[in-house]
């Protein structure tokens, strides 16, 4: 029997961790392993991409995909967790921003920005998750880092509730985006709800409730590993090329150069049935070697 491999587009319910969703899948997929491509906090819902079997080697490619979120914030309030999961304090006499002020503040947060992640996050500090230190009363001061915000749209606003739709790159914290937007207007904000609408080609409308997966039918919902690298250029391998790659040898392909004189840094390599078998990287002029192999057990 062929090993199970593929991708599940799941709709994480509120109140459970992303790890719990992976555990559900792993119990069904045994002995295959599974892993998710981007944590959602217990408060959050929406698209959680889970890779199964050899497709777990493609998690980093899903993580690179742009993401779309809908976040709900309460202005004039603050919390150590930056959301309603922590103790929320209402600011006395907090200013009430106008819609025009909010639009202007949001526009200043579009582009490549420096963002300080929340202390209650899974980022590692000296090998330990930041949230563990924060829970022990030692919240770390995490350094700001660059993130990409492509679009911020104000969906609804009726003070104190503000709903934003955000397109962004990996590593962006919506809690912190709401925090920074509010602080720029002299107030504060906590996130009260978060929904991930999409990760690249994986859309909320196509996602499945993990609690509805059953032993007999769950694997029918697997998407092929190729979905994880839908943005990479593709090549179809001849039988002798696939044999060379399987033996650790490079292959030669002249793919042409772009206007800047450069070729693609990576390729999705397909077998004669159109299945993804490897990610290739440049090994020299017209030479390509395996970066990620999906055929190995």
Image (cartoon, rainbow, N blue to C red):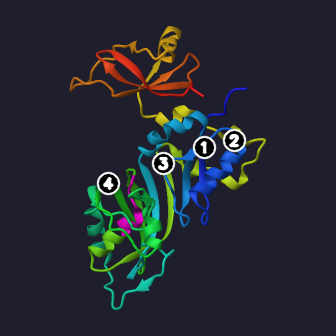
Q: Which residue lies furthest to the bottom in this view?
A: 93
Residue 125 falls in image quadrant: bottom left
Assess whether mark 1 and mark 3 are in contact (beta carbons under 8 angstroms).
no
Q: Residues under labels 3 and 4: Cα distance?
A: 16 Å
- 224 vs 159: above or below: above
Which residue in the structure is indicated by mark 1? 34
Which residue in the structure is indicated by mark 2? 29
Which mark sits nearer the N-terminus, 3 or 1? Answer: 1
One can see residue 208 in this view: no
Give the numbered dot on residue 147.
Answer: 4
Q: Residues under labels 2 and 1: Cα distance?
A: 8 Å
Assess whether mark 1 and mark 2 are in contact (beta carbons under 8 angstroms).
yes
- 251 vs 14: above or below: above
State the SS at label 3. strand
Which residue in the structure is indicated by mark 3? 199
Q: Is residue 149 left or right of residue 48?
A: left
Q: Which residue lies furthest to the left in this view?
A: 260
One can see residue 167 in this view: yes
- Magenta segment range? 171-178
Which mark sits nearer the N-terminus, 2 or 1? Answer: 2
Mark 3 or mark 4, which is nearer to you? 4
Mark 4 or mark 1, which is nearer to you? 1
């Amino acid at each position: 029997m062929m090993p199970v491999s593929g991708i599940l587009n799941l709709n994480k319910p509120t109140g459970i961790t992303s790890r719990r969703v992976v555990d559900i899948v792993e119990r069904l997929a045994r002995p295959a392993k599974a892993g998710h491509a981007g944590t959602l906090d217990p408060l959050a819902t929406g698209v959680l991409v889970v890779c199964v079997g050899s497709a777990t080697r493609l998690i980093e490619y899903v993580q690179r995909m742009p993401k779309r979120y809908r976040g709900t914030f309460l202005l004039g309030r603050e919390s150590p967790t930056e959301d309603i999961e922590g103790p929320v304090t209402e600011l006395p006499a907090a200013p009430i921003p106008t819609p025009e002020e909010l639009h202007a503040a949001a526009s200043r947060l579009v582009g490549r920005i420096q963002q300080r992640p929340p202390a209650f996050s899974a980022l590692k500090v000296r090998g330990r998750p930041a949230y563990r230190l924060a829970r022990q009363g030692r919240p770390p001061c995490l350094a700001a880092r660059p993130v990409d915000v492509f679009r911020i749209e104000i969906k609804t606003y009726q003070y104190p509730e503000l709903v934003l739709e955000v397109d962004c790159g990996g590593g962006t914290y919506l809690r912190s985006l709401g925090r920074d937007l509010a602080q720029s207007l002299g107030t504060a904000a906590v996130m009260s709800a978060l929904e991930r609408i999409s990760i690249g080609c994986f859309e909320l409308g196509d996602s499945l409730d993990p609690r509805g997966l059953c032993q007999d039918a769950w694997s029918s919902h697997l998407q092929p590993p190729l979905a994880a690298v839908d943005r990479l250029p593709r090549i179809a391998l001849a039988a002798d090329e696939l044999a060379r790659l399987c033996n650790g040898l490079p292959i030669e392909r002249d793919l042409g150069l772009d206007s800047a004189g450069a070729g693609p840094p990576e390729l999705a390599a397909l077998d004669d049935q159109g299945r993804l078998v490897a990610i290739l990287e440049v090994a020299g002029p017209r030479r390509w070697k395996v970066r990620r192999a999906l055929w190995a057990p």
